[in-house]
Image (cartoon, rainbow, N blue to C red):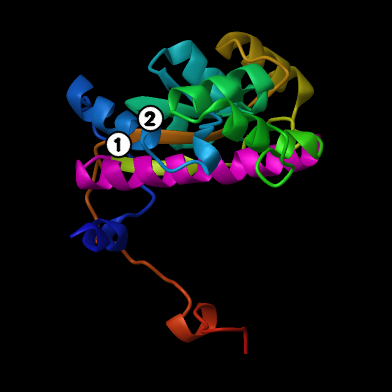
Amino acid sequence: MLLEEIKKRKSVRSYSEEKISDETLNEILEAGRLAPSWVNVQPWKFIVIRDEKTKELLYKASGEQKQVLGANVIIACVADMEAWEKKNFGAVLEKSGKNQMVQDYILNSPTLNPSLLGNVEMLTRTIEQLTYAVAYMSIQAEKSGVGCCIIGALANEMTKGDENIIKELKEQLNLNDKQILLTLLTLGYEKTPKETNKIRKEPAEVIFYEKLS
C-alpha cells in the first residue's frame, strides 16, 4: 500500500558504498516524469549527476551538506520556465490532442498560462509543478529501498546565495537564464538503517471541512 511508503519515508543523509542500479534509478526518474502537471506543461528538467567534481560544486552550493558528497547519485531538479513559452507549451498541447481553438484558449488565458502574468507568477507556478515530481521521485525511492534526501537549501537565483557559485553551477549544468536549479535529490542505500520517527502535526491541526475553524 502506497501509504506505507509515505509513512516510512525519511531523509537519509548517510549512505553505504552499494551502487544504485540503472534499472532502479530509471524507475525513480520515471516516477518524476509521470508526475501530474498543470495543463501537462511539465516545466522541469532532471539532471543525473555522478561526477565527483560536479558533486563538489553542489556541495559548496548546498552549504556543505555532507550527503551531497556521499550520495551514490544526485538528481538535480531544474525549474524550467522555458516550458511556458508559446512554442514549447503549444507543442505539448498539440501532442496531447488539443485542437487549435483549445490551444489558443489555453495559451491566451492568464489562469491557465501564468507566463501572461509576469515572471514572479510564472516562477511560482513552475515551482509548484516541480514539487509534484520531487515528491513522486522521493516516494518511488522509498519503494525501491533507496535512501533519499531532498535538498532545497541551495545557492540559486531565489536564495540569493554566492553569485560566483551560482554562475559556475549554471555553466557546469548548462542552464540558461530561464532555468533554475531548485532542488537536489541525494540518493544512496542507507548506511545504518534506522526506524522512521515521523513527527507531524495532529490531523485536527491541518485538516478542516468546508472552512477553517
Q: Position of residue 3 (x, y in %)?
A: 26, 62
Q: Residue at x 22, y 50 (%)?
A: 193
**Residue beneath disc 2:** 70
Amino acid type, callout 1: Tyr
Q: Is residue 103 above or below residue 177?
A: below
Q: Quadrant of the N terminus?
A: bottom left
Is 45 in front, or is 194? 45
Judged from this view, the residue extending furthest toward the bottom is 213
Q: Residues within 10 Å of mark 1 (few under 14, many from 20)?
A: many
Label 2 sits on a secondary structure element that is helix
Is 66 in front, or is 32? 32
Label 1 sits on a secondary structure element that is loop
Left or right placement of residue 74 versus residue 211 in this view: left
Mark 1 and mark 2 residues within 8 Å of each other at the beta carbon: yes
**Image quarter for residue 161?**
top right
Amino acid type, callout 2: Gly
**Image quarter for residue 155?**
top right
Q: Position of residue 190 (x, y in %)?
A: 26, 42
Q: Is residue 53 above or below residue 186?
A: above
- Magenta-highlighted residues: 119-146
Q: Residue at x 32, y 37 (%)?
A: 31
